[in-house]
Amino acid sequence: MFSYNFKYELKLLLRSRWIQLLSIILLLLFGFSTFNGLQKVEKRKKDIRAAYVEVQENDEKMLKLLDSVERGMEVSVPRWTIPTSPMAVGNYHPRVAAMEPQSMAFIATGQADLFTHYVKPKVSGNDFAMNFAEMTSPVQLLFGSFDLAFVIIYLLPLLIIAFSYDILSAERESGSLRLLAAQPIKIHTWVLQKLGLRFFWLTLLVVCSLTLVFLVTGLNPLGQLGVFFGLLLLTLGYMLFWFSLAFLVNLGVGNSARNAVMLLGLWVAFVLLAPSLLNQMGNTLYPMPSRTLMINEMRNLKAEVTERQDEILDNFLRDHPEYAINDTTQFRGFYHRYMASQRLIKEELSPIVDAYEAQLKERQDWVDQFKWISPAVIVQESLNQMAGTSTQDYENFRKQVVRFAVGWREHFMPFLYNNKNFTQEDYPQLPKFQYETKAYASFATVPILFLISVGLFTIGFLFSGKTKKGELLTSS
Amino acid sequence: MIITNNLSKNYGGQTALDSLNLSVKTGEIYCLLGANGAGKTTTINLLLGFIEPSSGSAFINQLNVHENPKATKRFLAYIPENLMLYPSLSALENLDYFSGIAGKKISASDLEVFLNEAGLQPEAFNKRISTFSKGMRQKVGIAIALAKEAKVLLLDEPTSGLDPKASNEFGLLLQKLRNKGVATLMATHDLFRAKEVATHIGIMKDGNLKQQLVASDITLQELEKAYLQTMEYKALAL
């Protein structure tokens, strides 16, 4: 039966123009979403490049100023910005801490809409209050990004539904099912073969369209075979899940209209409702402590600490006798007090920050635990991880930036407390930020998706074993 | 070839078929006559295994239909009132598909022989079914039965809606199959065609087989009279 189904299913699909239509739709969707994704990545790269250029230009000015000052020349800039002061360098000539987009960043916007991709930590800045949030259009956030992930997660299931909702019901409604049922075949096996063949053709179209789109847009799938293969497997696993639902609905529900409504209902439930519910429940069970409150707390603490800056500085120097010993001038100005109190603020704020992060982690753990209720959620997460735009990636970036900010500050402390000028010779030693990517992508999602699908197919078989053929032939 | 033993079917207390005992041997054409709701289609559905009997049993080629649903279907061909084939496939392709999924691998030239034997014009072989009349579709149905080498043919009102010429051609095809030893059970309202093609005629009413007649023993008028009497219609109709 399979060879005949294979031969004639293709003929039927070609003659009903399904294959042609799907090819065009997939090419357009994949093409546009890839183009869109690449545009976003390009903008991100451009912004980062511009930030580096700005730093380079500032550095050139700084070196010229240093040269002039070191030669004893007058300079016409405000006193507090003269780069011989380490604090002036630390504050007015920060480095760029950038998160360069990964090679597959275009497949999923992920958190990229919400977070900035570079910051310039200053020596007197607050690490905790560093702003990673990107200014984003609320309309853009409402509708999401038209990227490959959107096409795969939201639109591909709709194509599968249109392609498979009436496999059995159309035969029943046209009357050909009675003739089929009079042949020595099992109807559920026949439906499975038809669905299997449609899955095969759709898979072929998806693989061809994606490869073509990648090649046209200048991406070499062979150059990143692992990621490309991972992307394909994930997409196929997700497609198989929707085909398994179509199998169940075809066997269980009835006429074409009801099948379509049922499958669209499942689409709404899995793709729209489940992620939203999960998010809402996460918010309710583990509400995020307010960032504004945290900043207020920080300001109160600062005000309180400002009043006892002299005492704090004395304590600090007692803890760091090396600064007191090496400095012959014993000059103590605003920044000496300020930087010492910053350390205290950091120590005192750490319980609040820890609580904030613990709550964030608990919420993330809770979401991780229940994300399996919807394959759309796990596929979105996996695609974000592949693209390097997942929550974990941005958290990794944030942690590296905070570490770098501490390093940047620490680099200037000996200059400050030893009352040592910053010179041209010190310039090459300035710390540089290098973002280290971590691979969060896990292919565990793929076998799980396949297992869920196989489970649903098995349920379909068990169910069809109990369904009387008469019901299949007559129910509506 | 076709045997039913006290075959009954109830739908929630409503009797659709009541203890039907029937036998159609090789080379016989048995026509079941009866008004709508008499139980003719229920009988065919039971023989096809589409529905489960409430009691009794049905046999095709000595195999119990409900115990061996797949095996019995190897021996039978079925033509419903409206034979719906795949409209975007040609006659040859439909024949190839249905005989193929029934487990018969047949060469293209042999498929043409079957279509020819079924009376389809050669120029129609490669035309899409969507352009076919009902009579032409019925011929493809007969070709499927020939290709399957069916021993049993089940027909559910196959001539309704056919013009007299097409109906006559269909009758001739049944005779051809009869000569090949096929046992045919045909549910019909068409008394004239039943008298023309049948070897045996059964008249059903309210799920019961009321009368069984040998077609050669009676005239069309006698058949009509017997039918109307069974249906308890007024003799005025005569």
Image (cartoon, coloured by chain):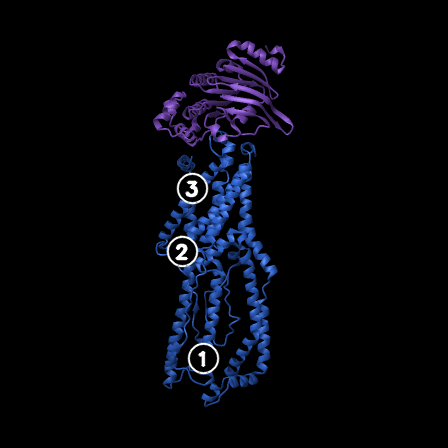
Chain colours: A blue, B purple
Which residue is the extreme one toward the front? Answer: B62
A307 and A175: which is toward the camera: A175
Residue A140's x, y, as percent? 50, 56
Q: Quadrant of residue A254?
A: top right
State the CA–CA distance, disc 3 to disc 1.
64 Å
Vertical relation: A448 (above or below) A7: below
Residue A117's x, y, as percent? 45, 65
- Disc 2: which chain? A
**Secondary structure found at label 1:** helix
Residue A189's x, y, as percent? 47, 37
Residue occupying image coordinates x 58% and y 21%: B20
Q: Residues within 10 Å of mark 1 (few under 14, many from 20)?
A: many
Q: Residues within 10 Å of mark 3 (few under 14, many from 20)?
A: few
State the CA–CA distance, disc 1 to disc 2.
42 Å
In the rendered structure, find residue A21 and report the number of the disc placed on it. 3
In the rendered structure, find residue A227 and report the number of the disc placed on it. 2
A59 and A356: which is toward the camera: A356
Whether labels 1 and 2 belong to a single chain: the reply is: yes
Which residue type carries mark 1?
Phe
Q: Quadrant of residue B126?
A: top left
| Badge nearest the viewer, 3 or 1 | 1
Whichever of callouts 3 and 1 sits on the residue coming sooner in the sequence is 3
Residue A299's x, y, as percent? 58, 74
Q: Quadrant of the C terminus of chain A?
A: top right
Left or right, A128 with respect to B130, comes to right
Which residue is the extreme one toward the bottom? Answer: A328
Task: Read off the residue under disc 1.
Answer: A412
A303 and B226: which is toward the camera: B226
Whichever of callouts 1 and 2 sits on the residue coming sooner in the sequence is 2
Vertical relation: A191 (above or below) A55: above
Residue occupying image coordinates x 49% and y 29%: A182
